[in-house]
């Protein structure tokens, strides 16, 4: 009678040991393949963003797209921007912060970005729930629990 109970206890302890030794993804670098997969997820779901641009929800806190800008000295830079318009496969976006590329782009400037240079999109709903944001989700997954807590406190974002 005690033999099966001992085996179950032993197996449970082994399982707990193996689970605790599993590698953590926190603070591990994001691979190029993982980043490209997140970009592909964003591109596959771009219709959600386009629908939001056609019929904006006035209670949304933020709508953004991550655009890739190329330059001469630095090969490229990815920045979150605010989409203003979309027409003929081109986004008109507002630059939110300065770029380090030597392209003359600056905050508050409006520029046109071809859709193929859009890497991600995000809609932050009034309650902080995040739609899209696939590259952000990937970065968030790599944070330690303490970093995640600080990130949530700073941004108010809720990843579900």
Image: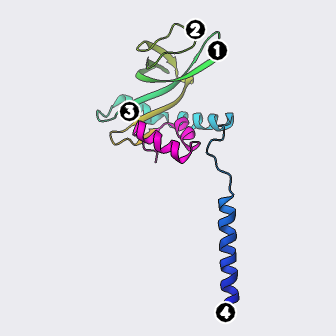
Tag 1 secondary structure: loop
Mark 3 in CB contact with mark 1 (< 8 angstroms)? no
- Residue 7, given in percent of the width and then of the height, sits at 70, 81
- What's the CA distance linking mark 4 and mark 2? 76 Å
Badge 4 is on which residue?
1
| Magenta highlight: main SS | helix
Q: Which residue is drawn at 48% across and 38% down?
A: 132
Mark 4 in CB contact with mark 1 (< 8 angstroms)? no
- What's the CA distance linking mark 3 and mark 4? 63 Å
Quarter-wise, where is residue 96 in the image? top left
- Residue 87, given in percent of the width and then of the height, sits at 44, 20
Q: Is residue 87 magenta?
A: no
Which of the two labelled residues, at mark 4 and mark 1, occupies the earlier sequence position? 4
Q: Using the image, tell me which numbered label, if any, was put on residue 107.
A: none
Between residues 67 and 89, which one lies in front from this camera angle? Answer: 67
Q: Residues within 10 Å of mark 1 (few under 14, many from 20)?
A: few
Q: Using the image, tell me which numbered label, if any, was put on residue 74.
A: 1
Q: Residue at x 38, y 28 (%)?
A: 53
Q: Is residue 138 magenta?
A: yes
């Amino acid at each position: 009678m005690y033999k099966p109970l001992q085996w179950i206890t032993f197996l449970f302890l082994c399982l707990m040991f193996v689970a605790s030794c599993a590698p953590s993804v926190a603070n591990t670098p994001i691979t190029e393949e993982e980043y490209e997969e997140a970009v592909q997820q964003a591109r596959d779901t771009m219709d959600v963003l386009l629908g939001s641009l056609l019929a904006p929800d006035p209670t949304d806190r933020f709508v953004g797209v991550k655009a890739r800008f190329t330059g001469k000295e630095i090969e490229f830079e990815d920045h979150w921007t605010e989409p203003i318009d979309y027409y003929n496969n081109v986004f008109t976006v507002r630059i939110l912060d300065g770029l380090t590329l030597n392209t003359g782009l600056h905050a508050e400037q409006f520029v046109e970005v071809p859709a193929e240079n859009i890497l991600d999109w995000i809609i932050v709903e009034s309650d902080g729930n995040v739609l899209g944001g696939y590259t952000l989700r990937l970065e968030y997954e790599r944070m330690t629990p303490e970093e995640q807590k600080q990130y949530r406190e700073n941004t108010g974002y809720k990843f579900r």
